[in-house]
Amino acid sequence: MAETEQPRGGPAPGGGGHWVPLLAVCAGYFMVILDVTIINVAVPVIGRELGASLTGIQWITDGYTLVFAGLLLTGGALGDRLGHRRVFCAGVLVFTAASAACALARDTPVLVAARLVEGLGAALIVPGSLALLQQSYPEPAARSRAFGLWGSMAGIAASAGPLLGGLLVSTVGWRWVFLINLPVGAACLALTLRHVAASPRHRSRSVDWPAQCAVVAAVALLVSALNEAGRRGWTSPAVLAAAGLSLVAVAAFTAREWWARSPVLPLGLLRSRALSGAAAIGLLFNFAFYGMVFTASLYFQHQRGYSALGTGAALFPAVAMTMFASVLSGRLARRTGHRPLVVSGLLVAAAGLAFWAALGPDPAYPLLVLPMTAAGFGTSFALTGTTTTAMTAAPAAYAGTASALFNTTRQIGSAAGVALGGTLLATATSYSAGLRTSMAAGALAYLAAAVLGRLCVPARSAQR
């Protein structure tokens, strides 16, 4: 039986504060995604100041992503059981405290440990963010707009990270890369407690810890294999071993879920074409978009000699379109439904990266504005409908689980895009050839996602 958290800190949202829950939830989500990319331009300076080894630098960057991706399903299951507002606020507290610890770290082991705790906080924040938006905006049109703005936060944070990180590192120092989270976290927590309504709790659903451990192992091993593939090569024994063990963990998870009385991810949910299709679409467009951002960032810095700040500015066209596209898709969905928007957005993005792949070596920068704009626009245009499809395909009691599944596949897609992009840049005959091959792979991923969108996204999403 479901019960509800007792409201604390003020009244539930309403009246003039209708959009305050969206602001609160998106602030938490923005912090989480920003921390994935903002660290990239700061880590060389951090390594020099703390005397970190190459392994230490890798863990500063990747440790956060590993814990974040590995614990997303756990965060979703805890939210379904304990209430999403409670778990979301706990995640914001953990994330903010860990950010302070990162900023105060005096050596590499302390910083790595704090980054791992940040990843835990992120895994508690993200599943609850979508569930809270679905709860706060039950009316389909408002919910679609809210999901669109939530989705735009990912593109803005991911693309703005290098620009903001370069600005902070070059002016006030690398510690502000983490200190910037403190006021955002405090505001997010205060707004959530005051303006986001209490969430149902389903205490009858126990947490299946063996299954949780299996999925953590599967995701962590897979993301590790993808990350290391970019450095060691796809045939490295370490990469192959991690990938093989990840498959073993997936098999163990599936067997456990088949027999569990209260599974963390009921296998019946995966029989929903809408939910499983949305998860696959999210994996593919994250693969393409984050692969583009990663390889373009390296290209601008290493091939064209841009500074960290200049690289962030060069990537800005990918950012500029995300908010516009998300708002536009949320408005148009009321008239057209989500399927045509998802498919058309993915086709626009595919055309953009295909255009980049067709350009010759070292094209003039103005020619690159079009493909970056197309990728940013198309991804955000499709994300609103894909998110809505995933969240409306599952029963309300499994909103956190659906959100966690959707975001886990997206994180895996991001890691795969970065890993493949790094491998192509390292093994191609020239940097520009590797970049164009990476863009072609991204275009194919967008095309595959468009086909899935045509098959799996309902013409009119279920209303509930």
Image (cartoon, helix red, strand yellow):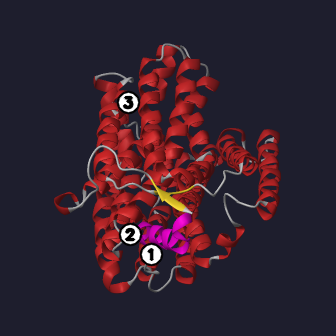
Decide: is 74 above or below 333.
above
Q: Is residue 303 visible?
A: no
Instruction: Give the mark nearer the N terminus: 1 vs 3.
Output: 3
Task: Please give left or right for residue 57 compared with residue 140 in the image.
Answer: right
Q: Which residue position holds label 3?
A: 177
Where in the figure is residue 190, as x and y percent of width and height? 30, 41
Instruction: Give the mark nearer the N terminus: 3 vs 2.
Output: 3
Residue situated furthest left in the rendering: 16
Q: Please check the rendered image and state whether residue 388 is part of the magenta-colored stretch, yes or no.
A: yes
Q: Which mark is residue 342?
A: 1
Decide: is 313 above or below 52.
below
Task: Please give left or right for residue 16 compared with residue 422 in the image.
Answer: left
Q: Residue at horizontal 31%, vertical 79%?
A: 332
Q: Which residue position holds label 2?
A: 381
Q: Residue at horizontal 43%, vertical 50%?
A: 85
**Local secondary structure at mark 1:** helix
Where in the figure is residue 352, as x and y percent of width and height? 42, 67
